[in-house]
Image (tube, rainbow, N blue to C red):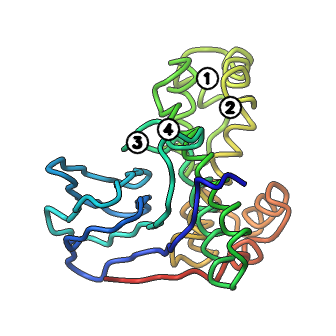
């Protein structure tokens, strides 16, 4: 384990009503990972408007504060750490948008769960290292990097994962045959067309299970399943467990609302 990384504290903030981040200066690096709403933060005179999937690395010993009141529900993970910018897993960008935000949410919940359950610092620091490695990977390859067509197709699949998508729908949308689309997706992402459709559907379900208060039936409707039993079958087949089992894996996390 790299000694240049040390966990201090973490939690998940969720606002109640109108909210603005108070002015604060801390001696640690703080990572902000937004899951809901818009967070408007200013650090050293520079303003950042963070939306779901945004990550901001706040520097130690520099004041940061909110610059505008949020009126809608706002939620984000906050993580205080000691970290040297020179280490290999330090994110490549100060502020960036996650390509796969659900992967990061799960890693955050794992780390918060084990910390709340009293796991030793060695365990939590190792989980922190994995989280940082994922942030580094995604900061090096935001949406738009790499093969433009593969990125466009994958992004379209992602934003339409809340409805039923067939391979023919993607083919018709982009004007290429299914085999060609599947080939370029596999070259760029490591999985073909049908697999990417299922992956995005599964990750949307996981996000809603972890980040929303929707019932299982409501999640089934929200993600395009007209048949609740089909929803359960899909999730168990692809995730290896039921939605209820997944929802309660990492239940112990520190939350705050101010």
Q: Which residue is mark 3?
A: 96
Q: The C terminus lies in which quarter of the figure?
A: bottom left
Q: Which quadrant would residue 37 be assigned to in this image?
A: bottom left
Task: Give the CA distance from mark 4 to mark 3.
Answer: 6 Å
Q: Earlier in the sequence, mark 3 or mark 1?
A: 3
- Location of mark 2 (residue): 167
Is the residue under label 1 in contact with that under label 4 (CB below 8 Å)?
A: no
**Helix, strand or loop under label 2:** helix
SS class of the residue under badge 3? strand
- Say which residue label 4 marks: 139
Position of 71 relative to 118 (above/below) = above
Q: CA distance from mark 2 to mark 3?
A: 30 Å
Q: Is 106 above or below relative to 161?
A: below
Q: Are marks 4 and 2 in contact (CB under 8 Å)?
A: no
Image spot of residue 49 (x, y percent): 25, 51
- Looking at the rendered structure, the secondary structure element under dot 1 is helix
Q: Label 1 neighbourhood size at 10 Å, few (<14), some (14-19), many (20+)?
A: some
Residue positioned 46% across, 74% down in the render: 12
Q: Callout 3 environment at 10 Å: few (<14), some (14 to 19), or many (20+)? A: many
Q: Nearer the viewer, residue 23 or 148?
A: 23
Residue in the picture at 41% in, 83% down: 256
Give the residue at x 67% y 69%.
Answer: 124
* Residue contact between numbered discs 4 and 3, judged by CB atoms under 8 Å: yes
Q: Nearer the viewer, mark 4 or mark 1?
A: 4
Q: Which mark is residue 171?
A: 1
Q: Is residue 152 above or below residue 126?
A: above
* Comes first in the chain, label 4 or label 1: 4
Q: CA distance from mark 3 to mark 1?
A: 30 Å
Cβ–Cβ under 8 Å for marks 1 and 2: yes
Give the number of the mark in front: 2 or 3.
3
């Amino acid at each position: 384990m790299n000694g240049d990384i040390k966990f201090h504290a973490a939690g998940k903030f969720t606002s109640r009503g109108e909210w603005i981040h108070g002015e604060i200066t801390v001696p640690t690096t703080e990572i902000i990972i937004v899951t809901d709403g818009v967070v408007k933060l200013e650090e050293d005179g520079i303003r950042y408007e963070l939306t779901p999937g945004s990550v901001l690395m706040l520097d130690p010993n520099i004041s940061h504060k909110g610059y505008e009141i949020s009126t809608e529900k706002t939620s984000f993970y906050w993580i205080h750490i000691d970290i040297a910018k020179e280490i290999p897993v330090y994110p490549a960008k100060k502020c960036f948008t996650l390509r796969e935000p659900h992967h990061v949410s799960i890693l955050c919940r794992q780390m918060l769960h084990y910390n709340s359950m009293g796991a030793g610092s060695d365990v939590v620091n190792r989980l922190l290292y994995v989280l940082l490695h994922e942030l580094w990977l995604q900061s090096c390859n935001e949406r738009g990097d790499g093969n433009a067509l593969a990125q466009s197709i994958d992004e379209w699949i992602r934003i339409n994962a809340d409805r039923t998508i067939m391979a023919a729908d993607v083919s018709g949308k982009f004007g290429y045959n299914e085999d060609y689309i599947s080939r370029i997706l596999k070259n760029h992402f490591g999985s073909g067309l049908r697999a990417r459709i299922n992956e995005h559907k599964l990750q949307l379900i996981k996000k809603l299970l972890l980040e929303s208060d929707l019932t299982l039936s409501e999640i089934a409707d929200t993600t395009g399943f007209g048949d609740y039993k089909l929803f359960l079958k899909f999730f168990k087949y692809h995730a290896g467990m039921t939605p209820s089992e997944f929802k309660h894996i990492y239940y112990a996390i520190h939350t705050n609302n101010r």
